[in-house]
Amino acid sequence: MARAAFATGLDPAQTAFLFGEGGDHRSGDGAVVSAKGGIASWLDLPEPPDPKGLRPKRRYRTVWISDVHLGTRGCNADMLVSFLRSVETETLYLVGDIIDGWRLKKGWYWPDAHNEVLRRILKMAHRGTRVVFICGNHDEMLRPYAGLTFGGVELLLDAIHTTADGRRLLVVHGDAFDAIVLYHRWLAFLGDKAYELMLRVNTTFNAVRRKMHLPYWSLSAYLKKRVKNAVQFITRYEEAVAHAAAERGVDGVVCGHIHSAEIRQFGAITYYNDGDWVESCTALVEDFAGAMSIIDWLAELKKNAADKAPVAHEAMPVGVPA
């Protein structure tokens, strides 16, 4: 377990904390907890009380999230934690780019909220949720460990998910269908630099918006939907993924990678993209009848704020005005 944690850029103290290899760690609320013996003991710490009252958790058969990019300033970790605390699910798929190893190699950025995301995921696994981590290109350093299980989390390169109504879905991050990433790696890193700059501008822009009591707004998502070449790329990407799914003989495909949540039909193949937690803050869910839908968590937080209603089991995350 230690080797996998080091590969993500975590230091020895964080490795011990996350994987229970001994030593103590100070939690976000200031309490010192022990990480000795197997799964870290902080998994059994009680949930903090909700000052605004409790709402029943939503129950799903399956939840898919991807492109969280922990280790970057663009990650909306607080919003993701609030979402994960609001749901119960039999299976949670982490569809790649959960930890941004590309960014961590360039410099360390890891606030407490990013620890809380990992804590929440490991706690779900500890309490019986099947957690499947599909390795992406930004967390490609985990790919050599595919087939192993760490802290109750299964590491895989891809998976086949069977829905409640019997449909077989290929679950894959999707970078293999991105010709720039696959064949022109240096262009991918150049694009990553430009994207990082845009996210920095977006962070500053939203800091100003918060002071003006305005909601979060994603510059990158806005530009992506309006720039012709980006729209054409997304369309070609979706077609390529659907074609690959048809060749695999499945009924549909679930992916991430392009930060664009979508449900589309390509002939007999249903294409699902669960979006991201940098720009749109979306997840894909399956109910117990097999019906699939996209949850726009940012839109729900804004609605809850406007209605002055509490979010399930948690106060309003940072960046969303109450």
Image: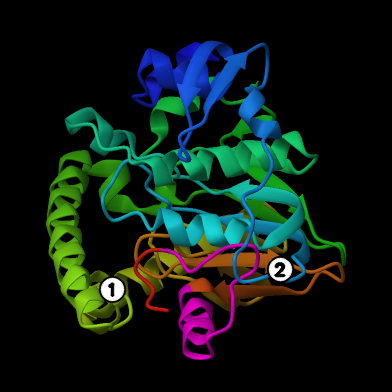
- Three-letter amino acid code at the position of disc 2: Leu
Q: Residue at x 12, y 56 (%)?
A: 197
Q: What stretch is highlighted in magenta?
A: 298-317
Q: Tell me, yes or no, whether the two marked residues, 1 and 2, touch with CB atoms within 8 Å.
A: no
For label 2, count other residues whose C-alpha is less than 10 Å away and answer few (under 14), some (14-19) or many (20+). few
Q: Give the number of the disc on residue 74.
A: none
Q: Residue at x 41, y 39 (%)?
A: 99
- Distance from Cα at disc 1 to Cα at disc 2: 30 Å
| Residue 219 falls within the magenta-colored stretch | no
The kind of secondary structure element at disc 1 is loop
- Three-letter amino acid code at the position of disc 1: Ser
Q: Give the number of the disc on residue 54.
A: 2
Apparent side of residue 133 relative to residue 302 in the rendered image (left or right): right
Q: Which residue is drawn at 34% across and 40% down?
A: 100
| Residue 312 falls within the magenta-colored stretch | yes
Query: Pointer 1: what residue?
Result: 218
Apparent side of residue 121 relative to residue 303 in the rendered image (left or right): right
For label 1, count other residues whose C-alpha is less than 10 Å away and answer few (under 14), some (14-19) or many (20+). some
Q: In which quarter of the image is the C terminus?
A: bottom left
Q: Pick whichever, 134 or 116, lies toward us.
A: 116
Q: Residue 208, position in %: x, y?
A: 16, 74
Asked whether residue 263 appears in the rendered view, the answer is yes
Sequence-earlier tag: 1 or 2: 2
Q: What coloring was used for the rendering?
A: rainbow
Q: Residue 102, position in %: x, y?
A: 27, 36
Asked whether residue 137 appears in the rendered view, the answer is no
Q: Pick whichever, 29 or 163, lies toward us.
A: 29
